[in-house]
Amino acid sequence: MTSTELANFTSKVERVSSLVNAAKRLLDEGQSIELSALTGHVEELCRYVQENPAEDNIPHKISLTAIMESLDELENKMVEQHQEFSEIHEFSTRSRAMEAYGKTEEDKPKKGE
């Protein structure tokens, strides 16, 4: 791997790490995220790793492993957020249905039921 290729690869690794960390931070803040840029950069990185000899990727093994772990963490956060939104939606739907059929406040489901 030439020094230019190494610098390019290092830049790609840093960019993916930065995007994953930003996505996790946004999820922690309760915001939605757009994954298309991250997906494109991850695909580039994967393609680069696949197209180059394994020994060229050895210096980046720790960084690549860290990215995989961060992507797993991001996935877990996304699953948690989806479950929370699903529960809120289900509660809201049940509450509206009960209101539509004239149930009283005491008859309405409590959050988490």
Image (cartoon, rainbow, N blue to C red):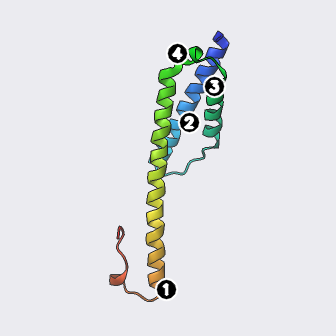
Residue marked by disc 3? 50
Local SS, label 3 = helix
Q: Nearer the viewer, residue 96 or 46?
A: 46
Q: Are marks 4 and 2 in contact (CB under 8 Å)?
A: no
**Mark 2 residue type:** Leu
Disc 4/disc 2 C-alpha distance (Å)? 21 Å
Mark 4 residue element? helix
The answer to whether the residues at label 1 and label 4 have Cβ atoms under 8 Å apart is: no
Query: Which of 105/77 is in front?
Result: 77
Q: Amino acid at mark 3?
A: Gln
Question: Tag on residue 19?
Answer: 2
**Amino acid type at mark 4:** Pro
Instruction: Determine crowd level at label 2: few under 14, some 14-19, many 20+ residues with C-alpha closer than 10 A.
Output: some
Tell me which corner region of the image, top left, top right, bottom left or bottom right, holds residue 53. Answer: top right
For marks 4 and 3 on the same chain, the one whose residue lies earlier in the sequence: 3
Q: State yes or no: discs 2 and 3 in contact (Cβ < 8 Å).
A: no
Badge count: 4
How crowded is the residue under tag 3: few (<14 C-alpha within 10 Å), some, or many (20+)? Answer: few
The N terminus sits in image quarter: top right
Amino acid type, mark 1? Ala
| Residue placed under numbered mark 4 in the picture | 59
